[in-house]
Image: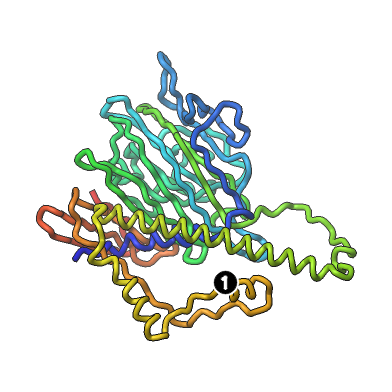
Amino acid sequence: MFKLPVPFLPFVFSTFFTLIIPSASGLSFNFTSFIVGDQNISYEDAAYPAEGAVQLTKNLRNANMNLSSGRATYSKPMQLWDEASGNLTDFTTHFSFSIDSQGRTTYGDGLAFFLGPEELPPLLSKGGSLGLLRNNQPLNTTDNQFVAVEFDIFQNYFDPPGEHVGIDINSMQSVNNITWLCDISGGRITEAWISYNSSTHNLSVAFTGYRNNAVEMQFLSQIVRLRDFLPARVSFGFSASTGDLFALHTLYSWDFNSSLEIVDNVTAPIDPAAASPPNGGSRRNRKKNRTGLAVGLGVGGGAIVVGAALVGFVIKFMCGHKDDEEGGHVLEEYMDDEFERGTGPKKPSIRQALHVLNFDAPLPMLPSKMPVPSYIAPPMSASSLSIMSYGLTDSEGGMNKSSSYSYNTNSSQFTASSSASSASAMLPHEG
């Protein structure tokens, strides 16, 4: 029986638990298209909206499209971390884009999703700098301040061979990278998901590639303490550039969610009357608290349902959409046994739930040891599944690891290989 590859699970559950965090106090938006005049997106240099999309570099007929760069950023900053408490935000983002050479087999240079200071440096550099740097010094970690995920299509002297996706910190030399199975000549659309977990400091990237004319998921991850590299409030968005070689860099959609509230520089003084409520104020506050709890439970519950649906969908997708009659009842049978023995959790009645919401009963205590679900997928029946690579490294050093997983349905074989090298050695790269 084929089990879901272990390296895929951290990304799925990192995204799932980030969804549980309410985003009402942080930033949340969803652009299914981009229209001219929308003040929520700021454009720099060659970037502009056209026909529902964003052109990040020049896209003009009968005009030179080389040596071009552009940026598209959200108009409001993101509160990355709180200076008073040091708390970091969680965030997730999903976007779709294409890099299209229009049939040419040579092209440049790529685009990036980035976080940087509110006052971004002017766009002075083209080519391999991808519009991120203050000047044409791609390896100058002193003058540059950014964290980015790059989708690079041209090999510069500091790059690994071929098209690749990399995670960059203050330098265009990626701290971790993977070969990108892209189709630049065909201009196919790429879907990308990026999430950051403030508890584990894990920056995770998932994106689509193409092999044998079929979509293939690819993954990359890096442990990075964003608070050590970026200010409390950051600008964020996309940048792209071309050099002597060029391609069209187009953004089609973008959604984003973060968990930390934006902190204003000026705080309002406390009203003494508000600090000491009159008689009956306690009852009113109690009602507000009940409402807040109900809303919180509703939002949180909805997020859990959506997150669970996402996890289920992805696992079903990874397993070739096959009915899971054989393995799908494992957790269900386990819970049935727990109920019969009286050792499992008890479903509360409507009356008990109302007592809790009315603060007439304490919140239920969860058992210290919860059952751990196991997701066992049936054998795949469709096309072969391949997770090309999953890398996880620490920005402070340690071991660099990369793994390759593949499952061939024709031969019913599952293979795995891994490699490791010291942090001082060259970063691993899989071709």
Mark 1 Cα shell of 10 Å, populated few (<14), some (14-19), many (≥20): few
Q: Which quadrant is the N terminus positioned in?
A: bottom left
In-front residue for pair 173/46: 46
Q: Residue at x 34, y 37 (%)?
A: 153
Furthest toward the top, the residue is: 62
Q: Name the residue under label 1.
A: 350
Q: Give the amino acid type for the residue marked by disc 1 in the picture.
A: Ile
The vertical placement of 129 against 353, above or below, is: above
In-front residue for pair 32/186: 32
Q: Position of residue 167 (x, y in %)?
A: 41, 51
Q: Where is residue 55 in the image (x, y as percent from the top left)?
A: 47, 29
The vertical placement of 175 against 120, above or below, is: below
In-front residue for pair 58/29: 29
Q: Which residue is drawn at 58% across and 54% down?
A: 23
Furthest toward the left, the residue is: 411
Q: Quadrant location of residue 351?
A: bottom right
Give SS at disc 1: helix
Q: Which residue is drawn at 41% across and 24% down?
A: 66
In-front residue for pair 306/205: 306
Q: Where is residue 403 in the image (x, y as percent from the top left)?
A: 26, 60
Query: Can residue 419 be seen?
Result: no
Left or right of 360? Residue 34 is: left
Q: Where is residue 408 in the image (x, y as percent from the top left)?
A: 15, 54
Query: Can residue 361 be seen?
Result: yes
Q: How is the image coloured?
A: rainbow
Disc tally is 1
Left or right of 326? Residue 34 is: right
Q: Which residue is drawn at 60% across and 27% down?
A: 37
